[in-house]
Image: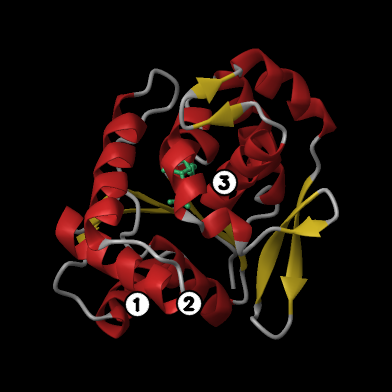
Amino acid sequence: DKKITIAIDGFSSTGKSTLAKQLAKHLGYVYVDTGAMYRAITLHAMDNGFISEDYFNKQGLIDSLSDITLQFLYNPELEYAEVYLDEENVESRIRSLNVSNLVSRVAEVSEVRAKLVEQQKHMGENKGVVMDGRDIGTVVFPNAELKLFMTASPETRAQRRFEELTQKGDNVTYEDVLKNVQERDYIDSHRKDSPLVKAADAIEIDNSHLSIQEQFDRVLTLAKKHI
Ligand code: C5P
């Protein structure tokens, strides 16, 4: 079989990672969650006092970038790779609402994007990769064989994220989650560097009313046309 690159972009909580993980597992491809990378950089900036709700030392953040090592290490039990910041597995810490509330501001910084995009290109250089994010089909892999653009209504997305967070025991309200989803949509699609837009050749999938299985079947059919 020919190995391809699958780029999945879209707004937050559209189920990109669920789909990407299923596809990668089925095809024997590597899955890369690029949102986790932006989240890990944000966590590092928070831990080091460069950013908080009311403070942003952008230069401090930029200067610290060269000291950060981000890695994905495969977890055989989960059957996907988890993100490590230096030596620490930060998979659970990066999913908090605190990080979600600040990540889009960190992701606006061009120096952050340049560092991560370079690493992402490198991870996909041998193809056989499913990568999800905001700029994968437009910036990271403009030549990807299959590009998907996922959408769902903000309420559907906030409900999904709310259930995910409360199941983990996070004490959040639906309103807080909806507000975060809407704020990130706005910042992500209005920033100067690599805003979230649908690539001209991406296929749009609105999954507000699709089951996970229906969505997977549809996309696998699309992928098989290129393999
Ligand atoms: O995908 P996830 O919701 O975890 O992404 C978190 C944030 O990281 C996004 O809201 C966006 O600000 C940023 N991001 C980005 N480019 C990517 C992936 C994520 O700017 N390729």
- Name the side, left or right, on which 212 lies relative to 167: left
Instruction: State the residue at coordinates (25%, 46%).
Output: 179
Q: Nearer the viewer, residue 10 or 125?
A: 10
Instruction: State the residue at coordinates (44%, 53%).
Output: 97
Q: Nearer the viewer, residue 98 or 227?
A: 98
Q: Amino acid at mark 1?
A: Phe
Report whether residue 200 is seen: no
Percent of width and height locating residue 160: 29, 69
Instruction: State the mark number for residue 44.
Output: none
The residue beneath circle 1 is 216
Residue with the most extreme top position: 59
The answer to whether residue 92 is above or below residue 56 is below
Q: Amino acid at mark 2?
A: Gln
Mark 2 nearby-residue class (10 Å; few <14, some 14–19, many ≥20): some
The residue beneath circle 2 is 22
2 and 1 marks in contact (CB < 8 Å): yes
Ranked by sequence position, the earlier of labels 2 and 3 is 2
Name which quarter of the figure residue 60 lies in. top right
Percent of width and height locating residue 138: 42, 35
Name which quarter of the figure residue 219 lies in. bottom left
